[in-house]
Image (cartoon, rainbow, N blue to C red):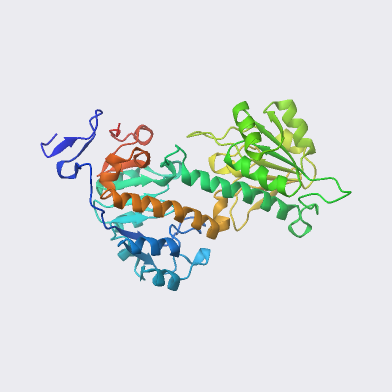
Amino acid sequence: MDQEFLSFSESGFYLPQEEVLEKKFQEHKLSIGIPKEIFLQEKRVALAPDSVALLVNHGHRIIFERGAGDSCSFLDHEYSEAGAEIVDDVKEVFQSDIILKISPPNITELDMMKNGKTLISALQLKIQKKEYFQKLINKKTTAIAFDYIKDEEGIFPVVRSMSEIAGNASVLIAAELLSNFNGGKGLLLGGIAGVSTTNILIIGAGTVGEFAARSAKALGCSVKIFDTSLHKLRRIQDKLGSRLDTSIIHPKALQKAIRRADVVIGAIRVKDERTPCVVNEEMVKMMKPLSVIIDVSIDRGGCFESSEITSHNNPTFEKHGVIHYCVPNIPSRMARTASFALSNIFSILLLKIASFGGVKNTIIQNDNISQGVYVINGNLTNKVIGDWYNLPYKTLK
């Protein structure tokens, strides 16, 4: 190793010596580019106008591609009035020091980035190719996956926020699909005097399951929740402040509940692994005619054997007499709300980066943000990526 490099940690990660920092920093002024999202029905935008105004007031520069906020009803003049520079040429956006996107850029977009700059986006490891990571390495990029960043309480704020939206949205979507106008059986998702309540079965007691249960209970539905963890089932009962009908996932108990359900919401999430398939085809065949399946877990494989990925344009299909909704990225359906939620997180993140004196300083000083780093100065730091694509890596710690 050349003398210009200095050890970053005991594991031997290296940074250029001039980038090794002191304890105190002067606030760094950031140049942040926001390009239009072009990936597969992604309608969210990384910063809302109010967050742009906050960042500009702190002396930062925001370069915004014209029309990037159109899909969630944020107009260009709102961004302009907030202090953003609106540009027509996307190449100008990608000249910024920091590129902030929702979906990871494609190879063409990466080619537009200047060497040695920073990318903040989702990682979406399952759909990436080796070429993507090789390009980041060759361009000496620093890449941060925002969905892997933790907050002070050890929570992944982006994942948590989007899961809350997906949970609430899943119940609203089920209500639409049960109506006659959407090919459903004409049920009201809720209860009125003298009429039996709608039965909702939720598989998974995580954040999605919790917020789906909140919405369903508020509408007056009968709710039952299944999970493999007693701890999660106890926690969801404590959080919702009422006694819920809960059960450990057991084939006989699950089969009985599925027979009675009008709506089944699949909300199982397993970290860094495929979602287990807990509802087989035979169980789906037992469901009531024109009942509804919402497979929120479809982006990780789905927890129903009968699930097939659909899109926002064609979100449903019918199989075994049951309506299936299997759209990945449900929060993009509520793009404006999701964008506000993400914008709150990203504006705080960017202000924190500035307060530490820049991206490299922040990675050294803040363990929570460094959790999201997978490439720094063109050096791969993520073991999973390195092993998966046979690329050399050196972890931060």
Q: Would you identify the image quadrant in which residue 347 lies?
A: bottom left
Total marks in image: 0
Left or right: 115 in relation to 176: left
The residue lying furthest to the left in this view is 3
- The residue depicted at 39 percent of the width and 44 percent of the height is 129
**Closer to the camera, 80 or 90?**
80
Q: Position of residue 325 (x, y in %)?
A: 65, 49
Quadrant location of the N terminus?
Answer: top left
For the point 27% across and 50% down, the residue is 358
Instruction: Please say whether residue 167 is visible from this viewpoint.
Output: yes
| In this rendering, position of residue 3 left or right of residue 135 | left
Residue 376 appears left or right of 341: left
Residue at horizontal 30 percent and vertical 52 percent from the top = 354
Q: Residue furthest right?
A: 194
Residue 34, x across and y down, in percent: 38, 60
In the rendered image, residue 332, in percent from the top left (x then y), is placed at 54, 55
Q: Quadrant of residue 11?
A: top left
- 369 up-or-down from 343: above or below: above
